[in-house]
Image (cartoon, grey):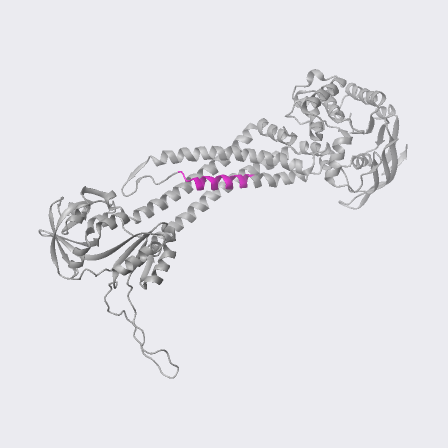
């Protein structure tokens, strides 16, 4: 079953000069797949990820998520879709420093508003437990170590049980030990929870352990 | 609690210093706005109330007439004219009928005739020039509340004593007169008459106190060698002094005499009031605006500081309007705190100033709690803080998360 499908995606940068970043990109992602995108700087892999994430809407071609066309939806519709179906992990954790870890994890679910605050809190605890952070839950996010913060960010990405988790260099800022931890978590999520993950990475080792690799060069897919 | 509100609250609480500075800005602006405007209303009230001690709302009198050409303008002939004031008597004809007619008008509360006579006060060798105002004591008291500024004697006695006179405190001091003393008046028509001082008043306006006296209407008519139908002025008070101009227009149509409202009669005073109003409004609004800029700046700073937060919130599904709500909530909360503080401070300031004694004509500082100005201040304060928050919030809502997160 295809969770995500990209058809003939082209993307241009207009500033300072017209430049085609992505050329005719087409691929699909199946449920439970752990997919990594690699390539040199400027190969367009991050640009592609932001298009897939629906945050960047300035492209040509078609994008399907959960078999629905999302190209052309309004910004607000896309925001709702991201809230419900996509979880994000970035190179930098981007936690809200004034909030406790637990709150940070809860925010997307509070935004979604499908469960009561109490239920959300329980769920958030469970997610933190999966990531081994239950004892850090009530600390302010800014007081945690880098590796811990990144794991909190992963818990936040998981809170709404998203269809896909997207990672932009999720291990880019971590040492090898923490990289291994994050990788193990991702692998565990795909194997045991059937979670679909798309991640952009520089890290060859990290990529080779994933199910599927898309290598990009100069805006084109070199190999799958 | 709604998640947007929760985030706004956290921003307010976690950055106490910034919040406090912004609140203080609004608080100062608000309190000064309410305070200054209440003061302005107080000034206006005190200046009109002191004015109404000697002036009625409307004065009806016979205006001087200018002579006109006897024939109308004709193209064939040249007409030589020499317009001048016609030397006719300035008395109102059949004053009782005119008074009755005026009394029938709605809004009219008091109508009283008055005859002013320029006189010399004589006592022994000393002589002071002044104005003897011929009045009907009861009606005049209703109109000017003369009893409220009597310092000696009894105004009531003027009614029973046709030779009674109530003099200003300045005259009494200069001529060394007290109640029951006699005083001699010489009018412009050369009539000499002796009056008995029945009372002394003090308005704290020294020129009035040194020259004015009240006598009975009939005595005044006698001083001017006139009969008892000689009335030069009819004074009219109405329910709302602000409508004086409109009612005056009506009265002049009905009676055929010139009717002049107090605003028209005191144009200099009105111009001064207007000027004061403009200055105070301008200054107080500017202060409020500056407070608004304070909030704007602080929220702008917050937006720049929180740009990463905004980006991630948008990435995880917050819409533009959610972001606007977060920052507007923050601004309006600051606004509310400032407004409440401002109202309290303004109330305290007014309470203190109300107790300051200035003396003279004014007495206590003329300021009072003006509910209208409080409401006005609160509304303007909230509107300004709303917009001061909305503009940076709009900016935050337009943040493109891709730009921030890709860095």
Do we see residue B290 in this rendering?
Answer: no
Res A223 seen here: yes
Q: Is residue A100 above or below residue A24?
A: above
Image quarter in which the N terminus of chain B is found = top right
The residue nearer to you, when weighing B344 against B59, is B59
In the picture as drawn, the residue positioned furthest to the right comes out as A223
Residue closest to the eye, B398 or B304: B398
Camera-nearest residue between B163 and A8? B163
Quarter of the figure with residue B372: top left
Q: Position of residue B81 (x, y in %)?
A: 31, 76
B46 sits left or right of B31 in the view: left
Could you say where residue B45 lies in the image, as x and y percent from the top left?
35, 45
- Give the left or right position of residue B377, taking residue A120 as reference: left
The residue lying furthest to the left in this view is: B124
Residue at the image position 53 percent from the left and 35 percent from the top: B335
Instruction: Tell me where residue B352 appears, x and y as whole percent.
Output: 37, 33
Q: Position of residue B133 (x, y in %)?
A: 21, 54
Residue A121, picture quadrant: top right
Q: Main secondary structure of the magenta part?
A: helix
Q: Quadrant of residue B389?
A: top right
Where's the C terminus of chain B, which quadrant? top right
Residue located at (47% from left, 40% from top): B375
Residue B268, magenta (yes or no):
no
Instruction: Specify whether residue B375 is painted magenta.
Output: yes
Is B6 drawn above or below residue B73 in the view shown? above
What range is drawn magenta here?
Answer: B369-385
């Amino acid at each position: 079953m295809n969770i995500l499908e990209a058809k003939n995606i082209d993307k241009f940068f207009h500033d300072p000069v017209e430049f085609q970043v992505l050329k005719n990109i087409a691929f699909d992602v199946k449920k439970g797949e752990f997919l990594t995108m690699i390539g040199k700087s400027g190969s367009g892999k991050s640009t592609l990820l932001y298009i897939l994430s629906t945050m960047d809407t300035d492209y040509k071609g078609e994008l399907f998520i959960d078999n629905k066309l999302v190209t052309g939806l309004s910004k607000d519709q896309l925001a709702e879709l991201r809230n419900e179906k996509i979880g994000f992990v970035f190179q930098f954790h981007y936690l809200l420093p004034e909030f406790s870890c637990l709150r940070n994890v809860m925010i997307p679910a509070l935004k979604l508003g499908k469960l009561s605050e109490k239920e959300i809190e329980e769920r958030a605890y469970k997610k933190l437990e999966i990531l081994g952070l239950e004892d850090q839950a009530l600390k302010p996010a800014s007081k945690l170590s880098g590796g811990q913060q990144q794991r909190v960010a992963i818990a936040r990405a998981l809170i709404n049980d998203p269809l896909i988790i997207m990672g932009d260099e999720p291990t880019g800022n971590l040492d090898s030990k923490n990289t291994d931890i994050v990788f193990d978590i991702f692998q565990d999520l795909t194997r045991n929870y059937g979670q679909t993950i798309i991640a952009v990475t520089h890290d060859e080792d990290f990529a080779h352990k994933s199910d599927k690799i898309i290598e990009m060069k100069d805006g084109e897919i070199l190999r799958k | 609690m709604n998640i947007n509100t929760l985030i706004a609250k956290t921003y307010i609480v976690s950055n106490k210093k910034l919040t406090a500075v912004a609140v203080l800005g609004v608080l100062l602006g608000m309190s000064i706005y309410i305070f200054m405007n209440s003061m302005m209303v107080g000034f206006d009230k005190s200046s009109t109330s002191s004015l109404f001690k000697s002036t009625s709302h409307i004065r009806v009198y016979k205006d001087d007439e200018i002579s006109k050409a006897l024939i109308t303008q004709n193209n064939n002939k040249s007409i030589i004219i020499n317009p001048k004031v016609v030397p006719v008597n300035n008395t109102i004809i059949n004053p009782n009928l005119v008074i009755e007619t005026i009394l029938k008008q709605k809004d009219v509360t008091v109508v009283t005739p008055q005859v002013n006579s320029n006189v010399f006060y004589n006592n022994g060798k000393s002589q002071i020039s002044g104005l003897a105002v011929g009045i009907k004591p009861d009606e005049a008291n209703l109109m000017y509340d003369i009893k409220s500024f009597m310092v000696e004697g009894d105004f009531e006695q003027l009614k029973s004593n046709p030779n009674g006179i109530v003099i200003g405190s300045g005259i009494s001091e200069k001529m060394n007169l007290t109640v029951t003393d006699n005083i001699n008046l010489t009018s412009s028509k050369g009539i000499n008459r002796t009056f008995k001082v029945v009372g002394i008043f003090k308005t704290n306006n020294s020129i009035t106190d040194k020259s004015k006296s009240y006598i009975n209407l009939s005595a005044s008519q006698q001083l001017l060698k006139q009969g008892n139908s000689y009335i030069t002025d009819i004074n009219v008070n109405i329910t709302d002094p602000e409508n004086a101009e409109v009612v005056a227009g009506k009265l002049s149509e009905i009676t055929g005499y010139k009717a002049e409202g107090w605003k028209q009669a005191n144009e200099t005073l009105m111009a001064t009031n207007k000027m004061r109003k403009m200055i105070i409004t301008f200054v107080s609004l500017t202060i409020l605006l500056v407070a608004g800029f304070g909030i704007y700046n602080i929220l702008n700073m917050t937006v720049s500081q929180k740009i990463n937060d905004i980006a991630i919130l948008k990435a995880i599904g917050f819409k533009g309007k959610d972001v606007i709500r977060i920052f507007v909530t923050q601004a309006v909360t600051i606004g509310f705190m400032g407004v409440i503080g401002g109202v309290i401070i303004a109330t305290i300031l007014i309470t203190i100033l109300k107790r300051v004694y200035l003396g003279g004509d004014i007495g206590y500082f003329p300021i009072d709690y003006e509910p209208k100005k409080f409401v006005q201040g609160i509304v303007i304060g909230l509107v300004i803080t709303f917009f001061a928050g909305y503009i940076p919030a709009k900016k935050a809502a337009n943040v493109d998360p891709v730009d921030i997160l890709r860095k």
